[in-house]
Amino acid sequence: MILKNLIAPLFIMLAAQAKGGDTASGADPLSLRVISFNIRYAAPGWIHERPWRVRGPRVIAQLAESAANATMAGAVPVIGLQEVLRAQLADIKGGLGPDWAHVGTGRDDGREKGEYCPLLYRRGAVALVDSVQRWLSPTPERPSFWPGAGSRRYVVVGVFEDAATGRRFIAANTHLDNVSAKARTEGVKIALDTIKEVQEKWGPGLGVTLTGDFNSEPGQDAYETVREDGYLVDMYTLVDETRRFGPYATYSGFDPSAEPRVEKRIDFVHVGPDNAWSANRYEVLSNVQEDIYISDHKAVVGDVTLRS
Ligand SMILES: *[C@@H]1O[C@H](CO)[C@@H](O)[C@H](O)[C@H]1NC(C)=O
Ligand SMILES: *[C@@H]1O[C@H](CO)[C@@H](O)[C@H](O)[C@H]1NC(C)=O
């Protein structure tokens, strides 16, 4: 009897430690590593910009390492990329391994043409429950432009179920226009509406992440549209400097001498709603390896844990 009273709590403690030690709520926590990275489409290159053949393996190695680090720490990696051509997506998925899948199509035909803005996830870690893709235009159901936009733009939204905890969350990824501020502000409203629609269908109360190249800095058009909307919050603003790592800017260009003039923070991991996640750590990774720019943007890495 005495022995049983001693041993039972010990087993509960050990079991809790094995699962990550979340005894307080009685439920397993769900942690994500959310990555946003504009990898730059495979352009021929120019002076400082090396071809994808040179950049690609380094991009893939960085993504694989960041995702593996997350997995080792018990977090689920979810990767939102921008400017990915079909062949680049094949290279990346080939490099990450057969466990990786994606949602999101080529933006120009809804199939394989043009840049993809894909969400990549590990099938062994999460199951895709539903996904919606909408173009950021007056005709969101088909490949189309916002009037005056430089390119066709879309948002892709996935509902995922974590295999370990059974918990669901929503992850979204986008790339806002580089030419028209109006296209960015109206486009990001469509992205937010799409996310909220998915929340209405599968929620309420699902945690949401939104990755993206906004082509818009804090204080400017689309960034301010999201801030004023309030549904999602820029992860950068949720962590103090002790939990922020790496440089401030997420865009550098390819020319080291021009970098101080052009660098800016335009790539984001937004999370929400209603304080759904605790923000643990934010990092901007270096995009220069052995003097090679692996992209003209840097990867943004956000570590979050679902509350309750
Ligand atoms: C992975 O973790 C190791 C050890 O903490 C760290 O040195 C490395 O920078 C991490 N890699 C990435 C891509 O974050
Ligand atoms: C916008 O992006 C397109 C495609 O990458 C590029 O051709 C164009 O020069 C860019 N425009 C501006 C204003 O940056």
Image (spheres, grey):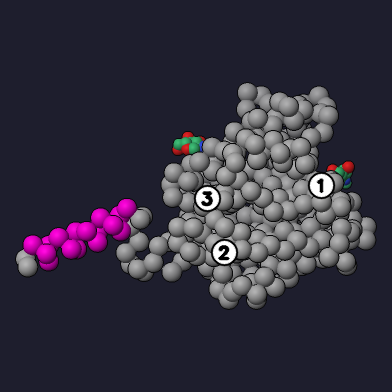
Rounded to the nearest whole Å, what is the CA distance between mark 1 and mark 2? 27 Å
Q: Earlier in the sequence, mark 1 or mark 2?
A: 1
| Quadrant for the N terminus in the image | bottom left
User: Would residue 291 appear left or right of 75 to someone viewing this image?
Assistant: right
Q: Position of residue 260 (x, y in %)?
A: 72, 36
| Quadrant for the C terminus in the image | bottom left
Q: Position of residue 241 (x, y in %)?
A: 51, 50
Q: Position of residue 262 (x, y in %)?
A: 76, 40
Query: Quick one: 302 or 251, which is closer to the camera?
Result: 302
Q: Position of residue 147 (x, y in %)?
A: 93, 61
- Label 3 residue SS: loop
Residue 11 sits inside the magenta stretch: yes
Mark 3 close to ligand 1, CB under 8 Å:
no
- Label 1 residue SS: loop
Q: Which mark's residue is nearer the viewer, 2 or 3?
A: 3
Residue displayed at 49% across by 46% down: 70
Residue under label 3, please give it: 124
Mark 2 close to ligand 1, CB under 8 Å:
no
Residue under label 2, please give it: 169
Residue under label 1, please give it: 112
Query: Quick one: 52 or 227, which is closer to the camera?
Result: 52
Instruction: Please give the label number shown on residue 66.
Output: none
The magenta span reads 3-18
Q: Amino acid at mark 1?
A: Glu
